[in-house]
Amino acid sequence: MICNNLEKIKFTIRQAATKSKRDPETIKLVAVSKRKPTEAIREANRCGQLLFGENYIQEAREKIQHLNPELQWHFIGHLQSNKAKDAAKFFQLIETVDRIKIAKVLNKFAGQYDKILNVLVQVNIGAEPQKSGIAVEDTEALLQDMKHLPHLRVQGLMTTPPYGHQPEDSRSWFRALKELSVKIAAKELFTDNENVELSMGMSGDYVVAIEEGATIVRVGTAIFGSR
Ligand SMILES: *Cc1c(COP(=O)(O)O)cnc(C)c1O
């Protein structure tokens, strides 16, 4: 079932990319495996999936240590300072940097591990009080501050838009994140302003996200079933 789901989703991603005149190879699929057992991840890996996303450091750490070391991991949950050391050690990309304090802590640990850590800045695009992410109007200043952190590679932006009943409900939020990224790239605040990553779109709305410029989609339920 997992293989079937993955094939269908990869096909749909290619279709959406082609429709939007984008190269399908530029879109990465993160298989979100939170609260799913390692056996489900192994199964996805057997049908070719290498990139996975996890929300909880403790859970992820157990899984990562038991799985194929070739797998790649994105951290997509809310990150606390006391978990930043493990985050910097076990993940290839931290998608949820939303304040300078956590950026500095990650930078410190990346330095200790002698690595350059890839990060995205998480934006609270709908200004929802219960959600993590930096406010749209504060994003530029955060990126400005992060320029001074030599062990971080700031690759782009990530968001989870307000809940909608239809995939189309997400479109204007995705468009807003894209516009924000263009504005920030024009000021050369990303590490590589020609290749900016945009992580947006989940099981319900990843097609719309791709149409609006997503380079990373994070899909859980549609691959692994409901949690
Ligand atoms: C759980 C989660 C996903 C995956 O959501 P699905 O609706 O299961 O595809 C994507 N992004 C984040 C940040 C998540 O927490």
Image (tube, rainbow, N blue to C red):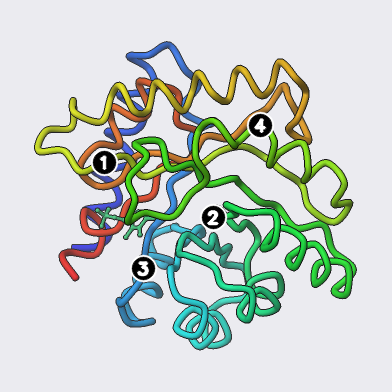
Q: How would you rate the neighbour count of disc 4 (Cα within 10 Å): few for under 14, some for 14-19, many for 20 or more? A: some
Question: Which of the two discs, 4 and 1, labels the residue nearer the N terminus?
Answer: 4
Going by the image, does 207 lie left or right of 197?
Answer: left
Give the labeled residue for mark 4: 140
Q: Residue lying at the far left in this picture: please name it.
A: 165
How far from the left and from the top, in percent, is residue 194?
A: 72, 21
Q: Secondary structure at mark 1?
A: loop
Disc 1 versus disc 3: distance between alpha carbons? 22 Å
Cβ of mark 3 under 8 Å from ligand 1: the answer is no
| For residue 167, above or below residue 118 | above
> Which quadrant of the render holds ligand 1?
bottom left
Q: How would you rate the neighbour count of disc 3 (Cα within 10 Å): few for under 14, some for 14-19, many for 20 or more? A: many
Cβ of mark 4 under 8 Å from ligand 1: the answer is no
Question: Which of the two discs, 1 and 2, labels the residue nearer the N terminus?
Answer: 2
**In the image, what residue type sits under mark 3?**
Ser
Question: Which of the two discs, 1 and 3, labels the residue nearer the N terminus?
Answer: 3
Disc 1 versus disc 2: distance between alpha carbons? 16 Å
Q: Secondary structure at mark 3?
A: loop
Give the labeled residue for mark 1: 162
Q: What residue appears at the point 63 percent right and 72 percent down from the top-left corner?
A: 87
Q: Secondary structure at mark 4?
A: helix
**In the image, what residue type sits under mark 2?**
Thr
Give the labeled residue for mark 2: 96
Disc 2 versus disc 3: distance between alpha carbons? 17 Å
Going by the image, does 42 lie left or right of 4?
Answer: right
Closer to the eye: label 2 or 4: 4
Q: Are marks 1 and 3 in contact (CB under 8 Å)?
A: no
Query: Which residue is nearer to you in this view: 13 or 148?
Result: 148
Give the labeled residue for mark 3: 33
Q: Quadrant of residue 10?
A: top left
How far from the left and from the top, in percent, is residue 5?
A: 22, 53
